[in-house]
Image: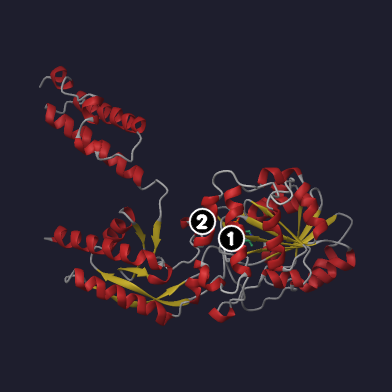
Amino acid sequence: MNTANNLSHLPSVDEILRQPEIIALSRCARQQLVIWIRSAVDDCRSEILAGVDFDPAAALRFVLQRTVRRVRAEDGRRQQPVINATGILLHTNLGRAPLAQRAVQRMQESAGYANVEMNLHTGKRNHRGERVCQLLQQLTTAEDAAVVNNCAAATMLVLQAMASGREVIVSRGQLVEIGGGYRLPEVFAASGAILKEVGTTNRTYLRDYENAIGERTGAIIRVHRSNFFQGGFVTEPDIADLVALGKQHNIPVIDDLGSGCIQNLSAYGLQEPTVGQSVAAGADLTLFSGDKLFGGPQAGIIVGKSSHVEMLRRHPMMRALRVDKVTLAAIEATAEIHLSENAAAQLPLLQMLSKSADDVRAIGERALSRLARKSDNVAIDLSECVSEVGGGSVPGSQIPSFGLRIQSTSSDAIAAKLRSGSPSILGRIQDGCVILDLRTVQESQLQPLIDRLVQVLQSETSDEA
Ligand SMILES: *Cc1c(COP(=O)(O)O)cnc(C)c1O
């Protein structure tokens, strides 16, 4: 074996770039491609030095294969649209709430220059998002509103502005972890507020709060249990009781609602406190996410008494936490939808919630009949399943639904193909079957889902043959 001779068989970067397989990867930036080709050539060199024999054709094949594999792996990391067939309406890994068409359009329109801080009627400067805040105020009946990057930012800002170096009273039953390592005690520490825990995990009384009030008290906070529930021997005062206590001692009461339910969802069988209830109960500030039940983009929305909101607006941290024009445009459109008469028809989140199990079954039957016409050898049927709200909202919610069920001995492989292909489809595996819950699939995605499913199932049958 001649190592030196073998090394002369290594292809050049230019030679690789001229190969049709590589030219087909047009979505890849050339500079990135060159880095991967060089690294594949290096790998090939190492193999040769380790004594493996490569003729010129084998060396070329080796480098090509490695490069194409790298590009494929990169594709799965590229942010791209996915079809959510998991049945989880607010899937945090999938960006929570899908936006309304009207919000998407307004984001696009705002992408160039937009009057973020200017009133075009008067030609004068106004504060960023002035109209958005007014819509939010109208929607929630609060005195004023402010918008930051997310609800975590809202909590941080509010604690820092209202109670830095002072005690904030919170029930031990509400010291929650939201997910992604967001733990309330750590947020307190980072904000400079001092955590004053009261009560026990399962029972906290109004008198526990009252006994904890002292010279150093800066605020009382209620944290909504938005991602878990407690049952059995439990009690805690409601927000109205806390507000009455706060008034008596001149201490502000903060309501961290998180889930941000605007409409009463009991018609859909879901019990979730609304922002309006919190405001009506008299909370000084109510905080919630823009991308949970509000159904908008990632944002933290703060509504409440104007003196507090004004103070937050002038706080130096506000500048660090403010949102951009595109987000403001989406919140503005989403708030307009909530204020309109037919929010359920325009907001994808409410559309998904308002479908009955029978509605979803009908969609499934349509999908099945289209599938049957295209492919006769698939073990696929319609099955009852359960959707969830998810995303740290309405814990334990169980929404009866229907999904396409693919029975196969290689469910994991089918799920992986659906996930990594184009369009990417995410389902779940249950009792060894792939389930594609159709509640979370948007109308316009149904045909692309069917087409891709047929492709994947046909490739499965040919794999077996
Ligand atoms: C979800 C949630 C948060 C965090 O909201 P983000 O918008 O994800 O930052 C904070 N508090 C509560 C109660 C929540 O449910």
Q: Residue at x 31, y 54 (%)?
A: 422
Q: Position of residue 287 (x, y in %)?
A: 69, 60
Along the viewing direction, whichever of 282 and 152 lies nearer the viewer: 282
Q: From what the image shows, is residue 304 above or below residue 265?
A: above
The residue carrying mark 1 has its beta carbon less than 8 Å from ligand 1: no
Which quarter of the rendered picture does the N terminus lie within?
top left
Which quarter of the rendered picture does the C terminus lie within?
bottom left
Point out which mark residue 353 bears: none
> Can residue 99 be seen in this snapshot?
no
Along the viewing direction, whichever of 370 and 230 lies nearer the viewer: 370
Tell me where residue 373 sits by quadrant.
bottom left
What amino acid type should be assigned to the residue bearing mark 2?
A: Gln
Q: Position of residue 150 (x, y in %)?
A: 62, 53
What amino acid type should be assigned to the residue bearing mark 1?
A: Ala
Q: Circle 2 sits on which residue?
A: 105
What secondary structure is found at the residue carrying circle 2? helix
Going from N to C along the chain, the mark reached first, 2 or 1, is 2
Q: Neighbour class for label 1 at 10 Å: few (<14), some, many (≥20)?
A: many
Colour pattern of the rendering: secondary structure
Q: Circle 1 sits on which residue?
A: 333
Q: From what the image shows, is residue 395 above or below residue 332?
A: below
Along the viewing direction, whichever of 275 and 166 lies nearer the viewer: 275
Q: Residue at x 34, y 67 (%)?
A: 446
In-image side of 13 versus 156 (left or right): left
> Where ligand 1 lies, by quadrant?
bottom right
Tell me where residue 343 sits by quadrant.
bottom right
Residue most toward the top? 4
